[in-house]
Each structure stands twice: as structure tokens, then as C-alpha cells.
Amino acid sequence: MLEIKNVYKEYENGDEPLVVLNNVSLKINDGEFVVVLGPSGSGKSTLLNAISGLTNVKSGSIVYDGKDITKLNDKELTLFRREYTSFVFQSYYLMPTLTVMQNVRMGGNLVNNKNLQEIIEKVGLVGKENKLPSELSGGQRQRVSIARAIAKKPKVMFCDEPTGALDEQTGRMILDYLIKNHKENGYMMVMVTHNENIALLADKIIKMNSGKIVEVIENDPKDIKDIRW
Amino acid sequence: MLTIKQTLKSFGIIIICFSLFFLETLFLSYQLDITDLDTSLFNPMQQGFYDAQISMCNMMNVISFGIIGVFSIILLFFSIERYIEENKANMGVLKALGYSKNRIALSFIKFSIPSTIGSALGYLGGVAFSKLFYSTMNADNIIEDFSFTFRPSLLLIFIFAPLIIVSIFAYIIALIKLRGNALDMINQTEKNKKSKTTKEKDSFLKEVKTTMLRNHISLIIFVAFSGLCFSANIQMAFTMLFEAETSPLFFWMIFGIGLLLGFTIIVLSFKFVYTNNKKYMGMLKAYGYTDKECYLALYGGYHIVSLLSFVLGTFYQVLIMSIAFKQFEGTYGIKYSFNLPGFFISIGLFIAIYISVNIYSYILIRKLKLDSLNSDLA
């Protein structure tokens, strides 16, 4: 379980600091799929960065299974990310010089996962194992990044606008892969988006504005086919 | 598009051009001045001295133009190409807006500024140093009334030749890069590189290290040149000082240029590797790879290149020094022998500098901020 209490973060902005997370508190259960929804500048990506251990906060606590990651030093935080987290970003961040299989191995290598071929099959990339990212379409690249994230066997999957750079058809397919794998593997999934329709797929919707959580909605998740884009 | 401030950041080019034209101003001027002398009245001693000096100037001209010159051209090509690649999207926007290819490409001729600054400083440095240099070369006053002659033609060639050549060079490279479709340039569509089937390695990090090396062949050349230049120059300086008993002036000149070139090129190469790969390093770190693992994947492959280039530089300087000593054997009665203390000092210095640059690179990776991953690491 993830428990966030009074998380506060600000950036220097001339004389007046810019508050990006203003005493945010939240609980996410194991296996839950949570969507953080909000307009640009609402603090949703900063919240994702903070709870995934990519950035530190000024005050508050972020507790995973009794371990407060705000108290960890850089080395411990690296080990935490190694053990707990995986990421899918809008910009894929595939290593352009590595093949599909090698990129997937980036995740699998950390947990000695030998079933990489099986994962590649799951995301529909059979036959593309030896291709470079430059030889793939946007949707295929995002599937590689999903396969890489799954290969790491994470406890929490963080997705930041994973369909932001994709067309509707590809976007739906990517969400389908993400949700299916989330259900199969039972990890916690936190997705940041500004698309309200995507939020309808989640178990819990957290609405943010101006660095604050303005609403938490327990949702009855819809199927990908039943939402508008 | 290309500002003067940005071109001045090409510090490495300034250093290389400075070194090249500093050496050339001294040795070419010296050679031209000594060749102009009337040798018909020379006694045998003066004739022997004259022949030896001409040989040394020939050798130094080959070293500076042949080695440093070739690498300056490669470095320039590499820097221009890199800059244009980084600005491809902006070039695509200008192209889409209707700017002619010619007009866009012309903005890149500003790339000749750093090389011209370097060559001008090198020329001025050479002129300022000439009095001391001439008096050292002709220390025993074997040839009387021999001094530096100002040659306007040399000034024009040394300053305008790099300006014109680099301008043309930058213009042509930009024109070639502008051949693509504007939309592809804006979207940064990568060329369809063909994937190669590679033998699967035991470790993912070994694969990263191998592909990093394979995709930065030009950097391997630079790292190798840095090691070779450092090793050869520093050892040459010691050999000249202790085995040929030349003036400390020569020692410091050759030593300084070796140090400057070796250090500058290795720093620039490592910085380039970091800048080009920081978002991927960020992703590795986000996934939980340690700073050490990221550092080794990125830079580990260059260690062996550096070491081998140092060894190669040692052989290279042995060869050059043996030939040079043979030239002077008759006049000065000196014989070449390998200077062991010089070797140990240079390898010690080399390791110290290489380790320092690696520590700096490690710190860059360690300080890499991960919170901008989702808004592209800038």
C-alpha cells in the first residue's frame, strides 16, 4: 500500500516560491489502478515524480509498505526504484541504438527475468525483436516501452500521458495492453493524464488543480471500448 | 539561428587551431627565414647547423600540419555536423516557412569564428614568442644577425585560410543536411538505420557499452587522438630535455601543447557522450540502475581505447625521436635513448587527468535530475 501524507513541494520562482504540491494526502491500495487527472500545471506530473522517487519533496511522507521514501538517500532511493517501480512515458525513452529485445532486457535484466520473449508476444511485437526503435511506428515504440516496464516485474507502474503522442486507435490499443497487464500481474498502476475519458478506466480518479487534490472519486471502471476519446 | 555566443562555445576548436597555428607560425617562419639566408659563405659548422635546423622544421611542420591539422579538420567537421543535427528541427521550420536552403545554410558560416579566433591567437602568440624562440634555436649564435621577419602573406594565409575553408565547409554540410523534407526535419524523423543481429551478451549493460562505442566511432578517434597526442608530446618533451639537452623553452612548449590538446579533447569527447545520452541515462537511473552502472555503460568502453592510444603514442614518439636524433647525430653528437623517467611521469599524469575527467563524468551522471524525464530532459 502507498500512503502519502501532507506532501509539499515548491520551486524557486523569484521572490515568491511556486507551490507545486500543496499538502497532498492520499492512499492507494495494492493492485489498484489510479488515474491522476488535471490540467497542465496542476501538479499531476510532479506528484507522479515524487511518489515514484524521481524527485524529492520539501515536507510530508510517502510510505510504501511501511518504508518512507522521503527519508532515503540517493543510493537507497535507487534501490527502491530498482525493487518497486517501472515507468511508461509519453516520449518512450527507448535506447535508439538497442534493438527491441535489448530495450526490453533493460527492464528484465534488473530482476533476472528470462521470460522476455513471452512479454514481447503479449504486447504483439513478435518478429520485431531485432528491429531498432527507428524502424518502428509510434504505437510499436510505446509497446516496447510497456514490455520493458513489465519485464521488470514492478510493484508499481507509473505512466505519464502514455497515449499523449498517439492517435486514437493506437492510444486505445496501448491502454488495452496496459490495463490487461495490470490485471494479469496485479501491480499498482498510477497514470497521469489530462484526458477525462481515460480516467473512466480507473478504479480511482484523483482530480488535481493548483497543486492540490480537489476530488477523489471511487470509480466503477469502464471497458476501453465503452469510452469516448 | 547560430549565434556568436554559441560558436564561441566551441572552445575545443579554438584550442586546437591555436596550437596548430602557434607551432606553425614559429616553425614555418623560422624555416622561411633560415632558407632565405645566403649559405654560400657558411663554414662547415654553420652548414651542419643549417641542415639540422631545416630537417627539424620539416619534421615539426609534418607533425603540426599532418597530425594536428588533420584532426582539427575532423573535429571541425564533427562539431559542425553535430550542431546542425541538433538544430535540424529549427532548420525544418525555417524551410517550411519558405526560407531558401541557401539562406539557411549561410547562417552556418559563423562556425568559422572559433577557428579564426584560434588561428589569430595562435599567430599572435607565435609572433610574440618568436624572439625567445629564435634566440633559443640559435642559442650559441652560430648564425649571426638572424631574427624573425614579419611576413604579411603568412598573416593573411593563417587568418584567412581557416576563415574561408571553414565557412565553405559549414555551408556545404548545412546544404547537404537541408536536402531532406521539411516535415521530416521538424519531426526529427530518424534515418532508417538497419538493425544488425548481434550476439546476445550476458549482461544488458555490456550490450549498452558495446553499442555506445559502435555508435560513436568518431569519438573513439578523438579519445584515441587525445591519448596519442598527450603521450607523444609529453614524452617527446622529456626526451628533448634530458636526452638532447634542448632548452627548457622547448620542453614547456611541447609539454604545454600536449597537455592542452590531450586534456581539451578528452573533456569535450566525454561531455559530448554525456549530452547525447543523458535522457537515456536518466531512464536507466529511473529504472533503478546505479550511478556506477550508468557510468560504466556510458564510458567504460573508452578506457581500453585511452590506454591503447597512450601505448601507440609512446611508439610514435620513439619513431619520430629516433628519426630526429639521426638528423642531429652528425652535428651535435647525440644518440637517441628511451627516456624512462619521462615515460613514467607522462603515464602518471595521463592516468591522473583521465581519472579526473572520469570522476567529473561520474558526477555529471550522479547529479542528473530525473524529475524532468516526463518533460524531456533538457
Image (cartoon, rainbow, N blue to C red):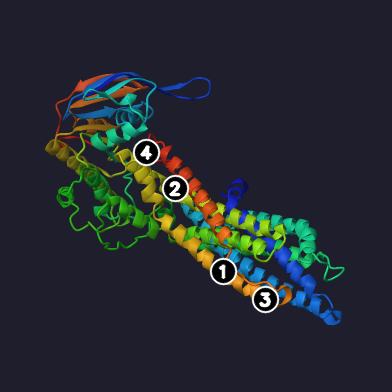
Sequence-first disc among 1 and 3:
1
Secondary structure found at label 3:
helix
Q: What is the spatial separation of the Cα atoms under label 1 and label 3, in whole angstroms?
A: 14 Å
Would residue B358 be found to the left or right of residue A109 on screen? right
| Residue B373 disc label | 4
Left/right of residue A197 with respect to residue B270 in the rendered view: left
Cβ atoms under marks 1 and 3 closer than 8 Å: no
Give the labeled residue for mark 3: B327
Q: Earlier in the sequence, mark 4 or mark 3?
A: 3
Q: Is residue A3 visible?
A: yes
- Residue bearing the label numbered 2: B274
Q: Say which residue appears at 53% left-offset and 64% top-offset.
A: B313
- Chain bearing tag 2 is B
Q: Residues within 10 Å of mark 4 (few under 14, many from 20)?
A: many
Q: Do badges 2 and 4 share one subunit? A: yes
Q: Amino acid at mark 3?
A: Gln
Residues at marks 2 and 4, CA–CA distance in whole angstroms: 16 Å
| Callout 2 amino acid | Tyr
Q: Earlier in the sequence, mark 2 or mark 4?
A: 2
| Label pair 2/4, CB-CB below 8 angstroms | no
Q: Is residue A103 left or right of residue B360?
A: left
Query: Toward the viewer: B122 or B58?
Result: B58
- Mark positioned earlier in the residue sequence (1 or 4): 1
Q: Nearer the viewer, mark 1 or mark 4?
A: 1
Q: Position of residue A147 (x, y in %)?
A: 22, 46
Which of the 4 image quarters holds residue B121?
A: bottom right
Hey, what amino acid is under mark 1? Val
How much space separates mark 2 and mark 3, taking CA atoms? Answer: 45 Å
Q: Quadrant of residue B337?
A: bottom right
The correct choice, above or below, for B242 with respect to B300 in the image is below
SS at mark 4? Answer: helix
Which circle marks residue B318 in the picture?
A: 1
